[in-house]
Amino acid sequence: MSSKRYPEEFKIEAVKQVTEKGHSVAEVAARLGTTTHSLYAWIKRYDPQQPNIVVESSDVLAELAKLRKELQRVTEERDNLK
C-alpha cells in the first residue's frame, strides 16, 4: 500500500473546489484521483471558515444551556404563583 503525497497548493485548490465552487466531495476526489477521506481531512485543515464553525458552535451551545436554565427558573416561578 503506497501513500501518495500531494503538495499543499494542490490540497488548497481541491478544498476551494468544494467550498467555493460547490462541487461535491465525491466528484472532486474522483476527478483528482484521491479519496474522499483525504479530501474531508484537507477541508478540515485548510478551510478558513472551519475553525469559526467550531467556535460559533460552542458559543451557541453555551447560550442554549443558559437559556434552558433561565426557562426552567421562570417556569418554576410561574408555577409557584399558580
Image: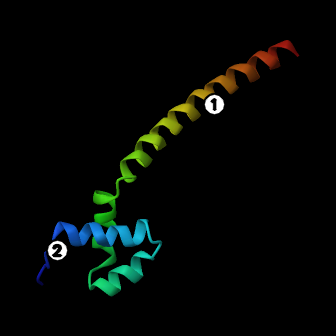
x, y (%) of residue 27?
A: 41, 83
Residue 47 image-quadrant placement: bottom left
Q: Residue at label 2?
A: 6
* Residue 27 position (above or below residue 65): below
Q: Residue furthest top?
A: 81
Residue visible at 41% across and 45% down in the picture: 52
Around disc 2, counting alpha carbons within 10 Å, would you say few (fewer than 14), some (14 to 19), or many (20 or more)?
few
Residue visible at 63% across and 30% down in the picture: 68
Q: Quadrant of the C terminus?
A: top right
Amino acid at pointer 1: Arg
Q: Please, which colouring scheme is shown? A: rainbow
x, y (%) of residue 44?
A: 33, 59
Q: Secondary structure at mark 2?
A: loop
Amino acid at pointer 2: Tyr
Residue visible at 43% across and 66% down in the picture: 20
Q: Nearer the viewer, mark 2 or mark 1?
A: 2
Q: Residue at label 1?
A: 68
Q: Secondary structure at mark 1?
A: helix
Q: Residue furthest right?
A: 82
x, y (%) of residue 23?
A: 45, 76
Cβ atoms under marks 2 and 1 closer than 8 Å: no
x, y (%) of residue 15?
A: 34, 68
Q: Nearer the viewer, residue 1 or 72?
A: 1
Q: Residue furthest left?
A: 2
Around disc 1, counting alpha carbons within 10 Å, would you say few (fewer than 14), some (14 to 19), or many (20 or more)?
few
